[in-house]
């Protein structure tokens, strides 16, 4: 039985974890408000007076290339996550509700994809895209992002728990064809789970650096992660660019926060339903 003297330990661990996560964010917020001179001469967590100047300079840098990087990230993450959620939903439903030879072996292969380090897949994917003539194109980043083994795993688990076999059989008895059964019966039940898949995949693609870094050479097609990295490299010779990199990093997390807040109703339902079913 836990004694009173040790009850504070979990709270202390959670507080340390919260501090570990929040300190870098607070640093970015404070640093983005500083001018180039204040960045290296004032206290780390003291606010500065140059946020609006930094924002204006970032927006005007190379005719607004930063906002093009943000738009590219929205394109890669938005379409990639949407198509990935759709593919994961169909595949997860099929693996959960259909019995066919090799089903478990196929699922095991997909699970093995979760364990593969991204670097081992990025190089072969680049070679395939180069062979198909798609290297240094939007498709070279978008296509590999559509297939998500982890998303398929989540969709299968959710479909198995959320869609009763009796409902599927009743729909078949009533004459529903398989595609209509999935669209009209299964899909509405899977919406909370697919929203979670969409959210996870959106964040993964938005934060992805390695794949677009390998695939793309034209900086007008860069996502914001690779664009800020290229800006940081230029900052080694021009320290004034550091404030632009920090301000750009702060702005780049705003869409993710907005997405989490906008979709929290769905993924909270998903977590609660999973807890009840488990």
Image (cartoon, rainbow, N blue to C red):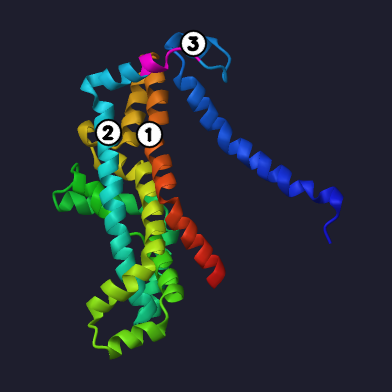
Mark 1 vs mark 3, CA separation in Å = 22 Å
Q: Nearer the viewer, residue 170 or 126?
A: 170
- Marked residue nearer the N-terminal end (3 or 2): 3
x 40%, y 72%: residue: 159
Q: Position of residue 81 (x, y in %)?
A: 31, 53
Magenta stretch: includes residue 176: no
Q: Would you name the residue on which mark 3 appears?
A: 38
x 35%, y 29%: residue: 228
Q: Nearer the viewer, residue 215 or 139?
A: 139
Is residue 101 among the parts visible in the rendering? no
Give the side of residue 48 with respect to residue 75, left or right. Answer: right
Give the side of residue 128 with respect to residue 257, left or right. Answer: left
* Residue range highlighted in magenta: 48-54
Secondary element type, mark 3:
helix
Residue 214 position by quadrant: top left
Q: Would you name the residue on which mark 1 appears?
A: 252
Q: Quadrant of the N terminus?
A: bottom right
Q: Would you name the residue on which mark 2 appears?
A: 69
Residue 238 position by quadrant: top left
Secondary element type, mark 1:
helix
Q: Position of residue 147 (x, y in %)?
A: 31, 60
Near mark 1 (Cα within 10 A), the count class, few <14, some 14-19 or many ≥20, is many
Question: Is 105 rendered above or below residue 85?
Answer: below
């Amino acid at each position: 039985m836990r004694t009173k003297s040790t009850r504070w330990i979990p709270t202390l661990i959670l507080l340390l974890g919260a501090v570990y996560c929040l300190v870098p964010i607070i640093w970015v917020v404070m640093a983005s408000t500083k001018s180039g001179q204040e960045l290296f001469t004032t206290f780390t967590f003291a606010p500065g007076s140059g946020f609006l100047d930094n924002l204006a300079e970032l927006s005007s840098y190379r005719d607004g290339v930063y906002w093009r990087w943000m738009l590219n990230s929205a394109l890669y993450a938005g379409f990639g996550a949407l198509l990935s959620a759709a593919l994961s939903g169909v595949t997860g439903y099929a693996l959960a509700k259909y019995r066919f030879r090799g089903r478990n072996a196929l699922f095991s292969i997909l699970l093995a994809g979760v364990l593969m380090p991204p670097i081992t897949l990025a190089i072969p994917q680049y070679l395939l895209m180069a062979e198909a003539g798609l290297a240094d194109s939007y498709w070279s980043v978008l296509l590999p992002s559509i297939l998500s083994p982890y998303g398929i795993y989540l969709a299968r688990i959710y479909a198995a728990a959320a869609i009763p076999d009796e409902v599927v059989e009743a729909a078949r008895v009533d004459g529903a064809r398989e595609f209509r059964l999935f669209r009209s019966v299964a899909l509405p039940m899977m919406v909370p789970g697919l929203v979670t898949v969409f959210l996870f995949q959106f964040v993964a693609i938005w934060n992805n650096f390695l794949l677009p870094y390998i695939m793309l050479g034209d900086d007008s097609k860069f996502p914001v992660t690779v664009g800020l990295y290229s800006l940081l490299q230029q900052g080694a010779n021009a320290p004034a660019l550091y404030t632009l990199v920090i301000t750009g990093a702060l702005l780049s997390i705003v869409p993710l926060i907005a997405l989490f807040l906008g979709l929290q109703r769905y993924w909270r339902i998903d977590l609660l339903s999973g807890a009840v079913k488990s």
